[in-house]
Amino acid sequence: MIDNRKVRIMTRMSIYEKHEGKEDLKLNKYFKSDYARLQVLKTLVSITLAYAIVLVLVALYQLEYLIDNALTLDYPELGKMILAYYIIVLAVYLVGALVGYGLKYQFSRKRLKKYYKLLRSLKEIYKEEDSYRSNM
């Protein structure tokens, strides 16, 4: 006979495993600080590459102006301005990544706790069934 409790629990677990479960189980391998650092490092590399690409595109767009004023441009000031914008953009994205991935990890842990609770209840149901069978 089909046990409705088991079916409901297994259905919930299956839905979780199909959607958020894959990602949550991967995150479970890490400590929160390690996961956040890894994601911040990825963000650092991505932002640096994106900033360099945007900088090259802006330079190509303004190439005529740069060539015409090559001798009169204040290169140290221009470098400081480019570096200042880079630091501001980088700081904003790194703080956002740190907060965002920290929250993602916390929500993942909460979902995993519910998943493990379902596993424990399923295990208890199986224990009940085994004890019932052994008493017969």
Image (tube, rainbow, N blue to C red):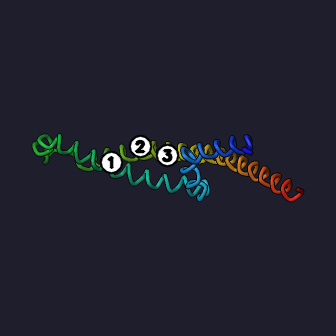
Q: Residues within 10 Å of mark 3 (few under 14, many from 20)?
A: many
Residue drawn at x 32%, y 44% is: 81
Residue toward you, 86 or 68: 86
Residue at (22%, 44%) from the top-left corner?
57
The residue to which callout 1 is attached is 50
Q: CA distance from mark 3 to mark 1?
A: 16 Å
**Chain-order first, disc 3 or disc 1:** 1
Q: Residue at the location (59% across, 55% down)?
A: 33
Viewer-proximal residue among 90 and 37: 37
Which amino acid type is shown beneath numbered disc 2?
Ile
Q: CA distance from mark 2 to mark 3?
A: 14 Å
Helix, strand or loop status at disc 1: helix
Quadrant where the N terminus is found in the figure: top right
Residue 55 image offset from top left, x and y in percent = 26, 46
Q: Is residue 89 left or right of residue 9?
A: left
- Assess disc 1: are there few (<14), some (14-19) or many (≥20) residues with their C-alpha within 10 Å of its C-alpha: few
Image spot of residue 113 (x, y percent):
69, 47
Element marked by disc 3? helix
Extreme right residue here?
Answer: 135
Label ID, residue 9:
none
* Label placed on residue 97: 3
Q: Are marks 2 and 3 in contact (CB under 8 Å)?
A: no
- Residue 12 at x, y = what percent? 64, 42
Sooner in the amino-acid sequence: mark 2 or mark 3 = 2
Residue under numbered circle 2: 88
Instruction: Check disc 2 and report its element: helix, strand or loop.
Output: helix
In whole angstroms, how far apart are the C-alphas of marks 2 and 1?
A: 14 Å
Give the class, few, some or many, for how many residues have Cα within 10 Å of label 2's Cα (few <14, many ≥20).
few
| Type of amino acid at the residue the image marks with label 3 | Ala
**Between disc 2 and disc 1, whose residue precedes?**
1
